Amino acid sequence: MKLTRRSLLARSAALGCSLAASPLLTPVTLAAAPWDARLVVIILRGGMDALDVVQPYGDPDYAGLRRTLSGGPDAGASDLDGFYALHPGLAPLLPLWRQGELGFVQAVSTPYRDRRSHFDGQDLLEAGTAGPGQAAGGWLNRLLQLLPGIEARTAFAIGQERMLLMEGDAPVSHWAPGAGLMMSPQAERLAGLLMEDDPLFHAALNEALELTRQDLSLGAADGGDDGDADMMMSMMTAPRGKAHAEVAAYAAQQLRGDSRIAAFSINGWDTHQRQANGLKNALGRLAETILTLRNGLGPEAWGKTAVAAVTEFGRTVRENGTGGTDHGTGGAMLLAGGAIRGGRVLGRWPGLAEADLYDRRDLMPTADVRSPLAWLLHGLTGAGRSGLEADVFPGLNMGGNPGLLL
């Protein structure tokens, strides 16, 4: 029998506390959450270009601002409503749009402005605050702290990157595809002695440790741990293989059971150059992720699911000289799922005339992205408006209900 990381998990439950530190082994209890709806939050790291994804081809200034990136039905995009068109990279999701299971909110942003830093922008997006240091942890974890009956398995942070929006005092489970088994030399020796009389367990341990050493060797060959530089590179570099689909499949598996919230990120949205190819590929991964979630959840669970894909900021309305766009302000969020009232592009459109732009360069935000997120949480979990505005998203005024859910 060939041993895989997955089969190792199945066999390692009996190893006890000596393996409890492995990121693949999170101690959890199987307790149902006090609500039945599901929420998936996807962070699109790098700054997704709203004007290329949900193309406002009906705006008279759009084509002149995008010399080679201007879209619309004449350039292969799919008309949505006579004003907006959908980038061809999301064409696989058109059936969801027609079924009312896909929608967008245009011209939204966090309260973050002006510096346009990935690091600050993502921190504020995941913290859910108007500024740094206004609340501890992330907004999804603060939501969990308001709700009764929460257990570790209620919410999953998935992937190998830090997910600030899940950090806090509430219990949360973690899973990372390809995560290795990290043990000190002394712990390796002790585990080997404990399992030397069981050939199957002994072989499983040795294979896990070898896989970890290989992963670490590959990481060192790629340049090791360089902090901010690695983060910047990951946002610009397309993820390898089908990691996004693996993450989505795992999320769907958990959400079919007792879990109710899953959060993960997809890199590759920082399109400073050759955006035509880069964005098409990134949108293909996003489309595959959503369809994997849909297929994995099945009709019943998908009908109770809302997916929200958000990004730290949008991009400039004008192309740069390398066929790309630079860091901007206003952006778009994507909504999908059987619980979504889709088939609509929401948000107040600000216009693209120069006087209508933010700093005469960016799409002007007309709404706080935290507001539609708060309404989703209110409708899916029953969290009260006062707690959402004071604790989950401190200082937010949710405004009127946009009717995002069925």
Image (tube, rainbow, N blue to C red):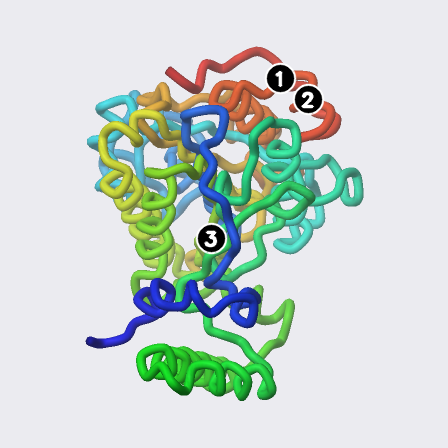
Mark 2 vs mark 3: which is more N-terminal?
A: 3
The vertical placement of 355 against 250, above or below, is: above
Q: Which residue is mark 1?
A: 384
Image point (31%, 54%), residue name: 245
Crowding near the residue tagged with mark 1, few <14, some 14–19, many ≥20 C-alpha atoms within 10 Å? some
- Is residue 247 positioned above or below 374 on the image? below
Lateral position of residue 148 relative to residue 309, left or right: right
Residue 158 - label: 3
Q: Quadrant of residue 357?
A: top right
Name the amino acid, label 1.
Gly
Using the image as rendered, state which of residue 188 and residue 234 is in the foreground. Answer: 188
Quadrant of the rendered structure where residue 290 is?
A: top left
Q: CA distance from mark 2 to mark 1?
A: 5 Å
- Residue occupying image coordinates x 60% and y 77%: 225
Residue 358 in sight in this render = no
Image quadrant for the N terminus? bottom left
| Other residues around mark 3 within 10 Å, as few (<14) / some (14–19) / many (≥20) | many
Task: Give amino acid for label 2.
Answer: Gly
345 relative to 122, above or below? above
Q: Which residue is mark 2?
A: 387
**Relative depth, front residue between 67 and 129:** 129
Which residue, as the protein is rendered here, is positioned at the far right? Answer: 133
Q: Residue at x 46, y 84 (%)?
A: 213
Q: Secondary structure at mark 2?
A: helix
Q: CA distance from mark 2 to mark 3?
A: 26 Å
Check if mark 3's residue and mark 1's residue have beta carbons within 8 Å. no
Q: Position of residue 226 (x, y in %)?
A: 62, 76
Q: Amino acid at mark 3?
A: Ile
Between discs 3 and 1, the one toward the N terminus: 3
- Element type where label 3 sits in the image: strand
